[in-house]
């Protein structure tokens, strides 16, 4: 997704959560200062089935979906679950709130890691990013991208991973370890999951595809804040 398409969607997210975009820009700039240019030719997913492995409790019983995929993206804490199962992902996506040590280990084993910067995690970025193998790290942002910090769309680690896989040509996306009805999460986390669902619904439209993980949810996901909707297709 081009930033011109993502920008208006981001503004709806910011308005709904009352976030300050200047804080996201500060985080992006910290990432930009600490990162090097990454060779994105390494992330060619053309024609492949990509499993976007989420960190919910369901992942352990859905590992077969992971093993049968051509490529695997480990989202946040899913990296630790996959490590324990003896599965090495092809890519990790994290904002460093969970399993940062696992992602550091993966980078040192040559696995690319996308590290997200937002207004709340600047201290974590400064603390952990220098410990990664810089040859295998790139930054992601929710605001305007730079040469070293990219934005392919997405708000949470999970839907951001899905947009990234779409950008690099994935033929099919699967979603093991995703749970939208987890009663144990906080109210704010539940709101973020709702936005993740809305953005996956957006991605369905872009790809002319239907993700089983959204079955039974699509009608409620059409209820956008303030009655607004957005364009998901790049012009």
Image (tube, rainbow, N blue to C red):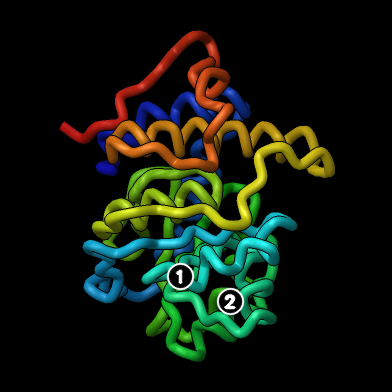
Q: Is residue 220 left or right of residue 144?
A: right
- Who's the residue at 38% across and 84% down the image? 135
- Depth check, mark 2 against mark 1: the one in front is 1
Please state the horizontal and vertical placement of residue 80, each as a whole percent of the image. 67, 74
Sort mark 1 into few (<14), some (14-19) or many (20+) by Cα contacts within 10 Å.
few
Please state the horizontal and vertical placement of residue 206, each as a whole percent of the image. 29, 36
Point out the tag, 2 or 1, that comes first from the N-terminus.
1
**Image quadrant assignment for residue 2:** top left
Nearer-the-camera pick, 107 or 34: 107
**Can residue 222 be seen here?**
yes
Please state the horizontal and vertical placement of residue 190, each as a whole percent of the image. 71, 35
Is 222 placed above or below 21 here? above
Nearer-the-camera pick, 14 or 195: 195
Residue reaching furthest to the top: 227
**Where does label 1 land, which residue?**
68
Residue reaching furthest to the right: 184
Is 81 placed above or below 213 here? below
Q: Is residue 222 left or right of residue 205?
A: right
Name the disc covering residue 19, or none: none
User: What secondary structure is found at the residue carrying circle 1?
Assistant: helix
- Who's the residue at 65% across and 80% down the image? 85
User: What secondary structure is found at the residue carrying circle 2?
Assistant: helix
Residue reaching furthest to the left: 235
Q: Is residue 184 left or right of residue 164?
A: right
Please state the horizontal and vertical placement of residue 222, each as a whole percent of the image. 49, 18
**Where does label 2 land, which residue?**
103
- Who's the residue at 28% across and 40% down the image? 207
Nearer-the-camera pick, 180 or 193: 180
Sort mark 2 into few (<14), some (14-19) or many (20+) by Cα contacts within 10 Å.
many
- Who's the residue at 44% across and 13% down the image? 228
């Amino acid at each position: 997704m081009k930033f011109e398409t993502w920008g208006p969607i981001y503004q709806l997210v910011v308005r709904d959560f009352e976030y300050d975009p200047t804080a996201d820009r500060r985080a992006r700039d910290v990432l930009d200062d600490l990162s090097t240019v990454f060779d994105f030719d390494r992330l060619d997913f053309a024609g492949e089935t990509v499993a976007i492995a989420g960190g919910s409790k369901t992942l352990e019983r859905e590992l077969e979906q992971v093993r049968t995929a051509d490529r695997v993206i480990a989202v946040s804490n899913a990296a630790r679950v996959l490590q324990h199962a003896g599965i090495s992902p092809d890519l990790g996506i994290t904002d460093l709130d969970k399993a940062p040590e696992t992602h550091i280990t993966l980078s040192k084993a040559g696995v690319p890691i996308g590290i997200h910067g937002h207004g709340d995690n600047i201290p974590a970025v400064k603390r952990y990013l220098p410990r990664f193998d810089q040859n295998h790290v790139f930054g992601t942002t929710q605001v305007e991208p730079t040469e070293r910090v990219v934005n392919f769309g997405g708000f949470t680690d999970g839907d951001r991973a899905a947009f990234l896989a779409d950008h690099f040509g994935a033929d099919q996306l699967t979603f093991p370890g995703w749970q939208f009805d987890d009663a144990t999460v906080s109210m704010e986390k539940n709101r973020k999951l709702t936005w993740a669902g809305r953005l996956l619904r957006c991605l369905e439209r872009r790809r002319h595809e239907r993700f089983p993980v959204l079955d039974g949810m699509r009608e409620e996901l059409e209820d956008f804040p303030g009655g607004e909707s957005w364009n998901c297709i790049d012009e």
